[in-house]
Image (cartoon, helix red, strand yellow):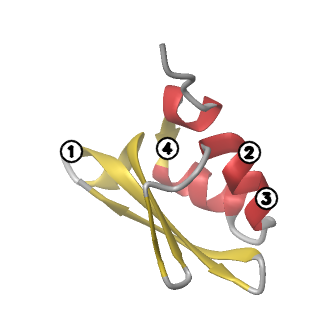
Amino acid sequence: KRFLPFGLKQVWDAAQLRKIYTGKPQSIIQSVFGIPVKMEGDNWVYKGVKVTNAIPGKVATTVTFTIQNGVVAGVLFAE
């Protein structure tokens, strides 16, 4: 059975997720969410993260952390 990182087991609120992780070191993101599914330049993409209040009427399942100088500069959500 595959180990599921803590961040993938939680149901997050979009505003809360942004508030908690913006400005934090990238090492925190890896320790909470594991290795990104995809790394596109400065963007670390995670799939299977449940996020409420990100998209009206839907649950977002993709989170992209933008990393600049080793720190989270932004958090984006998609279905």
Question: Residue placed at 50% from the left, 85% from the top?
Answer: 41
What label does residue 31 carry, if any? 2
Query: In the image, is 7 to the left or to the right of 58?
Result: right
Are the two marked residues, 2 and 3, in contact with CB atoms closer than 8 angstroms?
yes
Instruction: Give the residue displayed 49% in from the left and 44% down from the top.
Output: 13
> What amino acid type should be assigned to the residue bearing mark 3?
Ser
Q: Earlier in the sequence, mark 1 or mark 2?
A: 2
Residue 20 lies left or right of residue 10; in this view the side is right
Name the spot of residue 27 as percent of width and height, x first: 79, 58
Q: Is residue 26 left or right of residue 50?
A: right
User: Comparing marks 1 and 2, which lies closer to the viewer?
Assistant: 2
Q: Which residue is mark 1?
A: 58
User: Which numbered disc, 3 or 4, marks the residue that appears first in the sequence?
Assistant: 4
Residue 32 locus on image (x, y percent): 68, 42
**Mark 1–mark 2 distance (CA, rounded to whole Å):** 27 Å
The span from disc 2 to disc 3 (Cα, nearest Å) is: 6 Å
Cα distance in 3D space between marks 3 and 4: 21 Å
- Cα separation, mark 4 vs mark 1, equals 12 Å
Binning the other alpha carbons within 10 Å of mark 3 as few (below 14), some (14 to 19) or many (20 upward) gives few
| Three-letter code, disc 4 | Asp
What is the secondary structure assignment of the residue under circle 1? strand
Q: Where does label 4 land, which residue?
A: 13
Classify residue 38 by image quadrant: bottom left
What residue do we see at 31% from left, 48% from top? 60
Vertical placement of 78 versus 3: above or below? below
Mark 4 neighbour density, 10 Å: few (under 14) some (14–19) many (20 or more):
some
Which comes before the other along the chain, label 2 or label 4?
Answer: 4
